[in-house]
Image (spheres, rainbow, N blue to C red):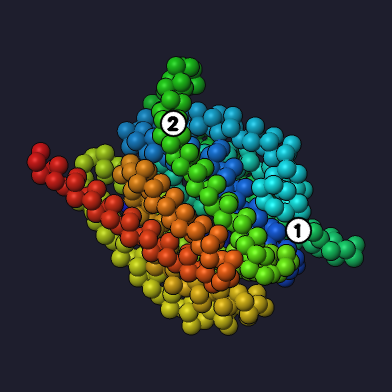
Amino acid sequence: MKRSNPFITGTIILTLTGLLSRLIGFFYRIYLSRLFGEEGMGVYQLLSPVLALTFSITAAGLQTAISKYVAGEASSKSYKSSFRFLMTGLALSLLLSLPCMGVMLHFSEFIAAKFLLEPRTASMLRIIALSVPLGAVHSCINGYFYGVKKAGLPAATQLIEQFFRVACVFLASFLADGRGTAPTINVAVVGLVVGEFGAMIVSILAVYLRFCRLSSTKGLRENAVKALHPISAYFSAAAKLLALSVPLSLNRIVINLLQSIEAVYIPSMLQTYGYDSATALSVYGVLTGMALPLIFFPNALTGSISLMLLPVVSEADAAGNRSAVKRAAGKTIYSCLFLGGICTLGFLILGRPVGRLLFHSELAGIFICSLSFICPFLYLCATLTSILHGLGKAGSVFFVNVSSLLIRLAFVFFLLPRFGINSYIAGMLFSQIYSAGLLLLFLKRIIGKKEKSCARF
């Protein structure tokens, strides 16, 4: 395959920057765990479901919709339409994100006490609310660049976000040490907001420069100017974006609500098992803030492939190129299984010494070894999900994700209080095997039906 192939180039760029970003984030988490301790990491990790839920409401569906429509418009060189989709998506995302930010600011105490079951997160929620509109703008612009197969900008903003986040926390920690005080976990939340702000500024600048360059190109200036005028065209673009993004967003919202319930009730069920509050949060912090990030580290490669697969599969499916879809699916399946097998072996052998070396935690090493078996299925699910989304089968993916989460919730509520954290890890493995098998079955049936319909034609 040619090196100029945008799929290959984009995947390489996203993989390299993703690995670098995850490497920075990984050592950043090690620093946080030593700075704030296992319990502090547990409290910090409770923000994850809120972040995921706000992203689902404000940007997740719109990012995918922008990417899909821009990919189609860019292939026909209709740049004025692709920019119209971007601007419309940005407006819709801001209309959703600003009220969402207001709700988080006003009801932070209620959300912390009743939803997260941890009053200490209230001040953190008020800080992180500021990142919601910033992240919405950043995500929509990323969707545009994914659609035109220019992965360099999303990759760059990923690194910029990490840089600003880490630099903010290091600076705050340095200043606190100079005054002889200890920084609170709120510093890490401020770092999230600063990182998102930096990524948004760079994204806006990049898309502005691209618009200026295209509008000055011969034959495009007039079209670019016209793109700013017809109001009816923006309403048409909004209708198309909402038709695709609303089902995707609703799916993500339902899934993230279930994930939020899971995340919030793990510490609670650990207390039912017999731990006190501090120990339950510490165990939760080690699992989600130390062990799982290491297990997800190789996902930089599969995540990059997944992001680039969606527009490629969408274009091939629209063109009726079934063989291209089949080849892409086959290669990614075998690659993910191979990568997952190597990671399982590596984590199984090195998990305990890595946990002691990096996190100074014997428990982290035990969790890494236990979680190693999910690697092949975890990485496989990411790429299969992207392929099915590219084929327009979001409903099938939604069914698999929801049913998989319900399986994990059953382990959380019925087995975790009786058998401890190991039963939850077993539930994760079982749900990943179930998801991978069902996604493979759906993909096989879809490709088989398409081939039969082409044969009849």
Which corner quadrant of the image does residue 108 belong to? top right
Neighbour tally class for label 1: few under 14, some 14-19, many 20 plus, Cα within 10 Å: some
Q: Quadrant of the N terminus?
A: bottom left
Q: Residue 161, image x and y in percent?
A: 62, 52
Q: Earlier in the sequence, mark 2 or mark 1?
A: 1
Label 1 is placed on what type of residue? Ile
Which residue occupies the foreground of this view, 238 or 103? 103
Tell which residue pokes out farthest to the left in this image.
456
Which corner quadrant of the image does residue 111 belong to? top right
Q: Residue under label 2, please give it.
A: 241
Which residue is depicted at the point 70% across and 59% down? 43
Where disc 2 sits, the SS reads helix
State left or right for residue 134 relative to residue 252. right
Q: Residue 259, image x and y in percent?
A: 54, 52
Label 2 is placed on what type of residue? Leu
Q: Residue 104, image x and y in percent?
A: 69, 40
Q: Do the residues labelled 2 and 1 touch (CB within 8 Å)?
A: no
Where disc 1 sits, the SS reads loop
User: Does residue 280 appear in the picture of this structure?
Assistant: yes
State left or right for residue 361 relative to residue 143. right
Which residue is depicted at the point 44% across and 31% down? 241
State left or right for residue 52 relative to residue 240. right
